[in-house]
Image (cartoon, helix red, strand yellow):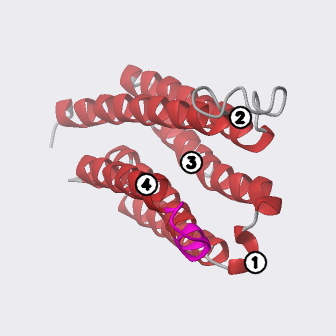
């Protein structure tokens, strides 16, 4: 069930992003509407990505599980409300938007550290942590390309069709989602092997 939450959030995000790239060019009104929808989808995916690892890693500690899941949900809601503000839709706030998403993602360091401390003797937890670190690095690299607009800032017009920063960003997002999915599957397998 918890893995379905992450996969559903990822699927919703990618569906939203297809719509954004297809319809945002229709008019200025559509442009702003669909890009705000995209920001909401990104926040939703980040929130959903927390559910499975926290659910399984803290299944013996329902207080901490509730605390972490409700905290990320609240922070995600506040980020969505902030990003839906029309004033923040311009390209001037690209760094702020990327920063808010990275902040949400890196909030995962707290429950991940707590889970490792609780289950340090469990090899699968440590392996899962490595995948989560890889996920964070991939998201960070993707955000770097998104914010800096490399390589098109170095050679304007040369990357309009293939190889521009937004495409590179999406490649890193998909790779990060796959790393997170691998980490989640390891945690699920570990939990399944524990006595009930």
What residue lies at 37% left-to-right and 24% top-to-bottom? 124
Q: Earlier in the sequence, mark 2 or mark 1?
A: 1
- The image quadrant that residue 180 belongs to is top left
Q: Earlier in the sequence, mark 2 or mark 4?
A: 4
Q: Could you give the CA–CA distance between mark 1 and mark 4, rounded to whole angstroms?
A: 23 Å
Task: Provide residue 17's location: percent of width, then percent of height.
Answer: 44, 53
| Comparing labels 2 and 4, the label whose residue is closer to the camera | 4
What residue would you read off at disc 4? 22
What residue lies at 64% left-to-right and 71% top-to-bottom? 83
Task: Provide residue 58's location: percent of width, then percent of height.
Answer: 38, 50
What residue would you read off at disc 2? 145
Q: Could you give the CA–CA distance between mark 1 and mark 3, rounded to whole angstroms?
A: 28 Å
Please say if the residues under marks 3 and 4 sit with CB atoms less than 8 Å apart.
Answer: no
What residue would you read off at disc 1? 87
Is 3 situated left or right of 48 in this image? left
Task: Provide residue 21's location: percent of width, then percent of height.
Answer: 48, 52
Q: Could you give the CA–CA distance between mark 3 and mark 2, rounded to whole angstroms?
A: 22 Å
What residue lies at 61% left-to-right and 44% top-to-bottom? 109
Crowding around mark 4 (Cα neighbors within 10 Å: few <14, some 14 to 19, many 20+) is: few
What residue would you read off at disc 3? 108
Q: Nearer the viewer, residue 137 or 166?
A: 166
Secondary element at tag 3: loop
Magenta part of the protein: which range? 24-33
Q: Earlier in the sequence, mark 1 or mark 4?
A: 4
């Amino acid at each position: 069930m918890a893995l379905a939450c992450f996969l559903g959030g990822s699927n919703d995000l990618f569906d939203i992003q297809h719509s954004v790239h297809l319809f945002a060019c229709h008019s200025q009104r559509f442009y702003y509407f669909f890009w705000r929808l995209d920001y909401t989808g990104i926040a939703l995916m980040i929130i959903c990505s927390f559910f499975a690892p926290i659910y399984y890693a803290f299944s013996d500690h329902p207080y901490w599980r509730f605390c972490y899941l409700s905290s990320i949900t609240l922070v995600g809601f506040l980020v969505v409300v902030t990003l839906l503000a029309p004033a923040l839709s311009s390209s001037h706030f690209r760094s702020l938007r990327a920063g808010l998403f990275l902040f949400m993602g890196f909030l995962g360091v707290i429950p991940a550290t707590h889970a490792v401390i609780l289950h340090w003797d469990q090899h699968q937890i440590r392996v899962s942590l490595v995948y989560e670190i890889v996920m964070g690095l991939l998201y960070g690299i993707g955000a770097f390309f998104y914010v800096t607009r490399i390589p098109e800032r170095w050679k304007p017009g040369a990357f309009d069709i293939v190889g521009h920063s937004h495409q590179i960003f999406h490649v890193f997002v998909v790779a990060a989602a796959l790393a997170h999915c691998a980490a989640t599957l390891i945690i699920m397998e570990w939990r399944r092997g524990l006595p009930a």
